[in-house]
Image: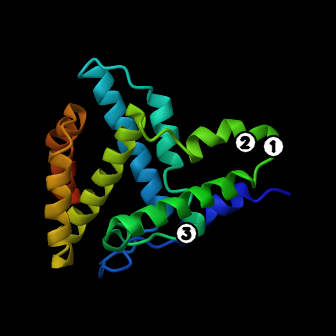
Amino acid sequence: MYNFFAFLDRMKYIRRWSLMRSSREENVMEHTQQVAVFAHALAVIDREVFKNDPDVEKTVLLALYHESSETMTGDLPTPIKYFNREIRGAYKQLEERAEQKLLGMLPEQLRAAFAPCVMPDTQSYEYRLVKAADKLSAYVKCLEELKGGNSEFKKAKESIEAELKGRAMPCLDYFMEHFVPAFLLTLDEMESL
C-alpha cells in the first residue's frame, strides 16, 4: 500500500492565511487548483500573445504539485517563513525533506516520473510562471477579502501588488490588466457584460 495520493488529498484540510481574519477560509487544495488555472493562463498568454515558448503542460503540472510538501509541514505563514535567512533556510530544508518523504510513498518505478513535479527545478521558466501564479492567487484572495469589507488584507494587497508589478513578466502584466479587474465585479455585473 502506498500513501502518496492519500497524503495529497489531505491538502483540503490545511488552512491558508492562518494569521489573518478571513471572511472565507481557504484551503491548500482549492488554492492549488486556482494556481494551476492561473499558471496555465500565464503560460498560454506567454505563448500566444508574446510568442514565447514555455512548456504549458509542464507549467500546469508544477502548479498542481507546488504545495505538496505542505501535506507534511502545513502552511507556514509568510511573515514567519520569510522572517530571516536562517528561518527561510531551515524551512526550505524541511520542505525538501517532506518532498523526499512524499516521493518515498510511491512505488519505486513511479518516483522518477513524479520527482520533477514534487521537487521541481526552481530555475526553470515554468517554475517562475508558477511562482507568479501563486502570488496572483494571493492577490486575488486579498481583492476578494477587501471587496467584502475586510480591511485585514489591505497591507497584504499593497505588498503583493508591488511584488507582482516588480516581476517584469509581460504575460503577468497582461493578466493583471485584462483579467484581474473582473475579480472586483459582482455576479450581476459580470453577467451584464
Number of other residues with Cα within 10 Å of mark 1, as a class: few under 14, some 14 to 19, many 20 or more: few
- Badge 2 is on which residue? 111
Q: Position of residue 25 (x, y in %)?
A: 39, 74
Task: State the CA–CA distance, disc 3 to disc 2.
Answer: 21 Å
Farthest residue, direction right: 1
Say few, some or many: other residues with alpha carbon within 10 Å of mark 3 (under 14 / 14 to 19 / 20 or more): some
Residue 28: x and y, percent?
48, 63
Q: Quadrant of residue 40?
A: top left
Q: Secondary structure at mark 1?
A: helix
Q: Secondary structure at mark 3?
A: helix
* As drawn, 168 above or below 154: above
Quadrant of image for the C terminus: top left
The quarter in which the N terminus is drawn is bottom right
How far apart, in angstroms, are the residues tagged by discs 1 and 3? 23 Å
Residue at 26% across, 58% down: 140
Where residue 154 sits in the image (x, y, percent)?
A: 15, 71
Q: Quadrant of residue 124?
A: top left
Residue depicted at x 47% and y 65%? 91
Identity, as a three-letter code, of the amino acid under mark 3: Thr
Q: Find out whether the residues at labels 1 and 2 contact each other: C-beta distance under 8 Å.
A: yes
| Disc 1: which residue | 108
Earlier along the polypeptide chain: callout 3 or callout 2?
A: 3
Q: Residue at x 57, y 56 (%)?
A: 96
Number of other residues with Cα within 10 Å of mark 2, as a class: few under 14, some 14 to 19, many 20 or more: some
Q: Which mark is residue 73?
A: 3
Looking at marks 1 and 3 on the same chain, the residue that comes earlier in the sequence is marked by 3
